[in-house]
Image (cartoon, rainbow, N blue to C red):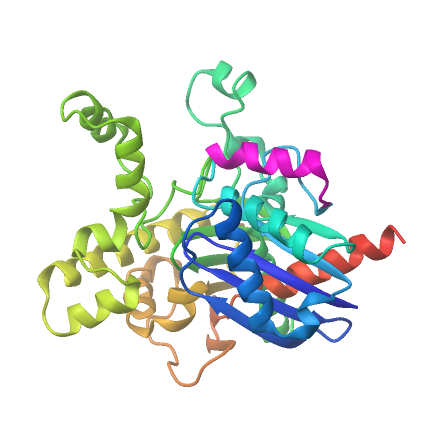
Amino acid sequence: MRILVLNAGSSSLKGSLIELPGETTVTSVEAERVSGGEGDAARRAVADLLDALGDEAHTPDAVGHRVVHGGTRFVAPVRVDADVLATIRGLATLAPLHNTMAADTIAASSELVDAVPQVACFDTAFHATLPREAIVYPLPWSWYAEWGVRRYGFHGLSVAWSVRRAADLLGAAPGELRLVVAHLGNGCSVTAVDGDRSIDTSMGYTPLEGIMMASRSGSVDPGILLAALRDRGLSPEALADVLDHQSGLHGLSGVAGGARAVEEAAAVGDERSVLALAVFARSAAAGIAAAAISLPALDALVFTGGIGANSVRLRADILARLPTLGVPAQVSVAGAGDAVLADGPPAVLRVTAREDLVIAAEVERLVTARG
């Protein structure tokens, strides 16, 4: 079966053509920037991506889509129909950087690659196993019971891949490891996994909570936000833009272009960039330590995502802040790709995120089961 996987992220549109069984990547393309997300703009973006992938991308057996937020309704992959698409779009209030783009991409794909199943796979679904104590906020009970305010968790497709690869790399049976998975990229989160169950994660009701990110703030004192609204005259919309686009590494350093650009600025002595990287490493280490206390023991720490897999400097700084976990500060930095950087325990692993392979497998199972 040949599966076209489309991943509409907050800053890019990725496409892969996956052959199953065998998990062969026939071709893969990433557009770093997607201009606009509605109507014709999304249709053009998908059409250009299909052309870049080649003729075979126009005739797959099914199309799988990464969708960040599935709410409480979607805890497993689902074949998309008009009702599903409307629900995904409605959840955009909880994931504004992602769900609107995903919904528009699904709509465009349904037009351009018609007569094949379109399947939505949700980042929140992996976290359906979170215990109640991990999902309820210390807010009035009615907010949870009546408003649905709760922790959902994100990056689940990436975490699922890291769990699988950790077992491969460590020669363990699937589902027997106790892991902390640090997905560090444009968005950043830390998840504690016991066997194959998510038991704690840093992102919450939205993908804005948790550790510091590339341009998102992560968790900050709510009093600061109240003061910005009350005393500084910021509108809710302006505040949302600050928290999503003008904070994190970018906000502290003043450098655009992500972690790599901030590291380059720090390397030539830019003091704000040096500080931004230190704050990021401190935040990530604190998130890892917090996740670890949810586990009975820690077999391995997994770094994944664009920063986690590729930034030697930030990995080293994070590890140096974790001596109380017994994590080795000195790890191998040679090579690329998935690797055991330190044997441990706890071991330290580097894993390249492959949400597309997780999505392809989920699509195949769903389509095959439905005949």
263 in magenta: no
> Is 350 left, or right, of 77 in this rendering?
left
Q: Is residue 88 magenta?
A: yes
Q: Residue 46: x percent and y percent?
A: 56, 59
- Quadrant showing the N terminus: bottom right
Apparent side of residue 99 relative to residue 366 in the rendered image (left or right): left
| Residue sitting nearer the eye, 331 or 106 | 106
Task: Kindly indicate the quadrant of the structure image that contains residue 233.
Answer: top left
Residue 297 visible, this angle? yes
Image coordinates of residue 144 in percent, x first then y, are: 52, 21
**Which residue appears at 40% of the width and 53% of the height?**
188
Say above or below: 141 vs 41: above
**Could you tell me what secondary structure mostly forms the magenta stretch?**
helix
Q: Farthest residue to the right: give it.
A: 371
The residue shown at (37%, 50%) is 287
- Toward which corner of the image does residue 82 lie, by quadrant? top right
Q: Please tell me which residue is depicted at 26% across the width and 40% down the height of the picture.
A: 242
Residue 208 in picture, x, y percent from top left:
38, 41
Q: Is residue 195 visible?
A: no
Magenta stretch in the rendered image: 79-93
Q: Nearer the viewer, residue 130 or 293?
A: 130
- Nearest the viewer among 123 and 335 is 123
| Image position, residue 118 (x, y; %) | 71, 51
Q: Is residue 91 above or below residue 282?
A: above
Q: Is residue 81 left or right of residue 179?
A: right
